[in-house]
Image (tube, grey):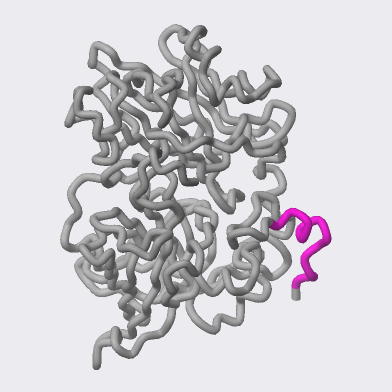
Amino acid sequence: MTPEPGIGPTPSQTVGPFFHDALLDGDRSEMVSPDHPEAVRLEGTVYDGAGEPVSDAMVEIWQANGAGRYNDHADNREDLPLDGDFSGFGRSGTDAGSRFSFVTVKPGAVPLPDGEMQAPHIMVSVFARGLLKRVVTRIYFPDEEEANAADPVLSSIEDPKPRETLIAHDEGDALRFDIHLQGENQTTFFEL
Amino acid sequence: MRQQPTDETASLRPEENGQPPYLYPDYVATRLRAPKQPLIILPRTLSDTTGPAYGRGPIGELDSDLTRQHAGEPLGERIIVTGRVLDGDGRPVRSSLIEIWQANAAGRYTHHLDRHPAPLDPNFSGAGRCLTDDEGRYTFVTVKPGAYPWKNHHNAWRPAHIHFSLFGSSFRSRLITQMYFPGDPLFEQDPIFQSVRPSEAQKRMIATFDLETTEPEWALGYEFDIVLEGRDATPMEGRR
């Protein structure tokens, strides 16, 4: 149909199980070369409410570059450098082992509209069969204890357990961020 | 026929904007995948009022014509699907990536996990993409997808649909949805379609047959406009 302005947004529907040829035919998970001096490997598993790994999910991430600037005209902070080769967007399916992975750089800090700084973080969307709409979360970094403690979004979550679901774990050669869609260890999800 | 939605389903349905709930028990796969903890409201910041310019490299000319991606033509009813992508204020969303995927005319996806015993079509992959133009318009040429069975409940069939993935202007406007065809008798028993209420919101997922778009002696035309959440607003405006 032809919507009139203001008629309301088009409803979301599940990505279903058969999106791979259309959405994952080019590798968008290596956002920088693994040889990049600042390269960070980010990986995790998506779990359902029974604790079973989800092998047909798609994870997308969106982040600022190392200087804290987004590669989008809506981020017009000209004083911060823009790296034209770094789009800030990544996409990974969960594979047969139900694992997603990215190679990226750690983003710089980004302010709130009032200038207050947020801790460095990555925006995450998860799509899957059985999700009628995406879930949205954020990945924070384990080596940013001070900034995390001061972060307005993290500190708005009083209970430590759901708060800590938003912080990745340092596993030496990679940062691990598992996503639990449901259950006792459910990841904290956001409403935009 | 499927039973009426349960009370539990009704109580979980968000009424405010016509988006489906996470948990819709009639769609069985939501039962173990729907989050159950309350969502945390995220303040508007640059992290979500920005977004990828487009999520892919250059778009090829044949990427939007799914009937010309192989040596021969696919079987099925040739269709043109066109429409505009608009933001929440009704303004066109320009140069924005749209990706689509669908079953072939027999109701079979090329995906290796699709076990429906319907034929594959060697001339149809069922995947396409394009960028919207300055008016926010997109156009795909394809064949009408077939309905197909799935095992959600006894004798469950998905209505014919084309999957659409859109980025819009920011992280907030990211949308994956499905476009349906008018008058499909399978809507009544399909919990994925029925998860959206009220029926006014369901209509936003159904294309309109359009004689203007239809090309004589060649292809039927369908019009499908898409309205994305969010606006091209900066966080300074303090909207959400």
Please state the total of marks drawn on the protein image. Answer: 0
Residue B230 falls within the magenta-colored stretch:
no
Residue B51, located in which quarter of the rendered image? top left
Start-end of magenta stretch:
B2-13
Residue B53, located in which quarter of the rendered image? top left
Above or below, B19 relative to A51: below
Above or below, B78 relative to B71: below
Q: Residue at x 23, y 15 (%)?
A: A35
Residue B55, can we see it? yes
Q: Which one is in front, A13 or A100?
A: A13
Above or below, B219 relative to B114: below
Above or below, B232 relative to A152: below
Q: Residue at x 42, y 50 (%)?
A: B173
Residue B9 falls within the magenta-colored stretch:
yes
Q: Horizontal and vertical percent for residue A58?
A: 47, 41
Q: Horizontal and vertical percent for residue B210?
A: 36, 86
Quarter placement of the N terminus of chain A = bottom left
Residue sticking out furthest to the right? B7
Q: Residue at x 43, y 52 (%)?
A: B230
Image-based side of B200 in relation to A67, left or right: right
Residue sticking out furthest to the bottom? B217
Q: Which one is in front, B123 or B85?
A: B85
Q: Horizontal and vertical percent for residue B208?
A: 43, 81
Image-based side of B73 in relation to A163, left or right: left
Q: Residue at x 27, y 46 (%)?
A: B54
Q: Horizontal and vertical percent for residue B107?
A: 48, 70
Q: Which one is in front, B159 or B44?
A: B44
Residue A171, can we see it? no
Image-based side of B233 in relation to A34, left or right: right
